[in-house]
Amino acid sequence: MQRATDDDSIIESRVRAILERVRQGGDEALRAITTEIDGRCPDSLQVSEAEFAEAEALVSDDLKAAIRQAADNISAFHRAQQISTVDVRTMPGVHCRRRVLPIRRVGLYIPGGSAPLFSTILMLALPAQIAGCEEIVLCTPCDRTSGKVNPVVLYTAQLCGVRTIYKLGGAQAVAAMAYGTESIRRVYKIFGPGNRYVTKAKQMVSAQGTAIDMPAGPSEVMVMADATAQPAFVAADFLSQAEHGPDSQSILVCNSQKLAAEVEAEITRQLALLPRADIATRSLENSRIVVFDDVNTMVDFANDYAAEHLIIAMDDAWSVANRITAAGSIFVGHYSPESAGDYASGTNHTLPTMGLATAYSGIGLDSFMHAITYQELTQAGLNALGTTIVQMAEAEGLDAHANAVKVRLSSEDSENSESSEDSSCPLNWVRPNILALKPYSTARDEYKGTIGIYLDANENPFENGYNRYPSTTLKAQVRSTIAQKKGVDPARLFLGNGSDEAIDLLFRIFCRPGVDNVISIAPTYGMYSVCAAINDIEYREVMLDDNFALPVDKLLAAADAQSKLLFVCSPNNPTANAYSREQLITLVQQFPGIVVVDEAYIDFSSVPSMVELIDENPNLIVLQTLSKAYGLAGLRMGLAFAHERIISIFEQVKYPYNIGADTLALAQRLLATDITSQVQTLIAERERVAAALSTLPYVEKVYPSDANFLLVKVEHSRELYEYLIARELIVRDRSRTSGCEGTLRITIGTPEENDRLLAELKNRV
Ligand code: PMP
């Protein structure tokens, strides 16, 4: 289990001296130290544009293509590691957030000595770029005689967008990046491998306020192998590690004496052929082959050793891999050599050594980021939490802490401030990335009607009635017309491409994928669960009570701090019943998120609409549609009524022209039609059909309806459905919907259509 470690007390005192000289003497000290160590110092420490250009020309096309392929894989793997903001209302009036942001200035150290490790640039600079670090500085030693940096290093750096490179190596480079000099700005975190001087310098500056990637020791690999392993593969993996440096370590753990012997023979054979055989030979002195009786012991040993690289060359490698609890990176199966991860598979090759993999991770996107947490308490929030804080502070004997709360606690107004806080801030619930969007408007909106030649939207200028994007003025007019009909301020109305668009927008505006959840009743309109699935939002269904009654308490009990939306369809599709205003108000008042009341069928209901309540309830959103009572299903226009700040967010998130020009023009014309008599007829027909249906012997129940359809429970529902289809009467089979077993949903047609339906149904008796 032991790693090769040296006594580094001499190194420590040398490095201490170098750090101190650079801290005091800046650029001049850097030059002096470089000259002392290398015999000379380049005229300019910073790599010039000409040097970048020269380097680019020196790298072969094949190598460039290889580097680009590796860069693509590494970028893809690291880009997928984005960490999202956490935003939680821990209790009413107490809002906590954790926002992750890039480290502004980072420094990368790339060794140039025995091997120019340009691959490490990919491993460090790409995640730094993806994280969004503003400044990336790279230090690497140059060739002593030519004064030039290795061309592949320069090519790779500029491919990764790194243009600030200093020809500096060793502890002095670390010092320059940690302290800053006249020409080199200090960075906040230093990354990268190096010799013992570099490693020591990183350790020392990390105790002085500059972060480092991780403590580093000599590189190491462990290969776990069983009888299925190929000795030649294992020996090659062993040696690929051994050539890193004399202090590298390779360990083979297997359960077969035979394999151990074969691998040993292969190592001898392959070693002879290696150019870096001398280094590898020395490192083999630290290396071991260990034979255990069984796989369990192998796994225990691997977990205790916590290898930087762990290759599992075994049958069913994944089942072993899944039992590993400590390793930097695992290479699963016979065809996953360490070299794949070292260069190009996509994982990062900067990994914890010396057994630190028990607690450290390798470099990832998060290594280039740091987080800030936030909390905002409203006055009411602090009033609610204050006693808790005061009690804890006093128990710890920290009275000043308690005081900082007490001076803010007030008895007056606490009730009011709770509601006024929440009512003035419906944006509490909006996803942070949506809030960060900038509002857009076009000059055409701004100069409406005053300027006549439109050369701003890349349309075809020749008039055909449709060559222009739909007019925002016409949209505003339609919006006003509808708002007026509904008795609301147009600023509180959103027009969507059907209310289905509004439903989808609700998910996208309020729910963070993979984090938040929504709640709804069941059975209900299917689009809510479809949108939840599309947007990767957990969908929690609460079954309606007996007789389809609204389970108010159960809905509230299902909610937690991540419950952003509660959907209540009223009148409900497919159960046809509407819920009382009192029950809905209870939900609006007690649900921690937004309550969406879908009133697609409200015009057929005796229960009043909730629209008039949006003014006082910022967490209430009401949906309606022109598809039902207005007879305009083909138009595709849905309505969302909400607090005007929410409406403005809808406007921002929707597609720019969500409603076509024709739809707007037709809506303007058709909305003038009075629908009252049609609606009256449909309600009367509904009652007539319901009464007639309930006389049929195979009809078990006609549920009361507040909508333009009836839910009917019948014997042998599927056969009845097919019987009707055969007679060209298409109804909706709801038999398979849980909670609606054995039912058909029948939309109310014209009186003639209803007569036909009833006649056919009577015939069936
Ligand atoms: N809500 C409910 C409850 C519905 O039943 C429907 C359509 N059947 C919709 C919304 C969708 O309506 P729109 O045509 O406005 O998209």
Image: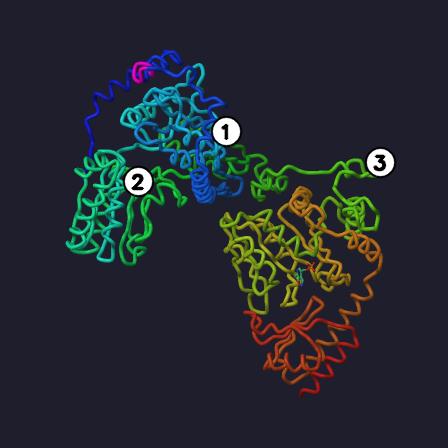
Q: Which amino acid does label 3 sit on?
A: Thr
Give the vertical position of 58 relative to 30 (above or below).
Answer: below
Q: Is residue 364 rendered to the left or right of residue 374?
A: left
Q: How far apart are marks 1 and 2 (CA)?
A: 29 Å
Indicate which disc, 2 or 3, sits on the residue closer to the N terminus: 2
Where is 461 relative to 279, above or below?
A: below
Q: Position of residue 41 (x, y in %)?
A: 37, 15
Examine the image and state in which quarter residue 172 appears: top left
Disc on the earlier residue, 1 or 2: 1
161 vs 207, nearest the viewer: 161
Badge 2 crowding class, 10 Å Cα cut-off, few under 14, some 14 to 19, many 20 or more, is few
The residue under label 1 is which amino acid type?
A: Glu
Identified by mark 2, the residue type is: Ala
Where's residue 600, x and y in %? 69, 60
- The x, y position of residue 284, in whole percent, is 19, 39
Classify the position of the N terminus by image quarter.
Answer: top left
Please state the extent of the stretch shown in magenta in the rendering.
34-39
The residue pinned by badge 3 equals 450
Say if 225 sits above or below 13 in the image: below
Question: How busy is the neighbourhood of tag 1: few (under 14 within 10 Å), some, or many (20 plus)?
Answer: few
Label 3 crowd (10 A; few <14 / some 14-19 / many >=20): few
State the residue position of label 1. 134
Residue 359 badge: 2
Whereabouts is ligand 1, in terms of quadrant? bottom right
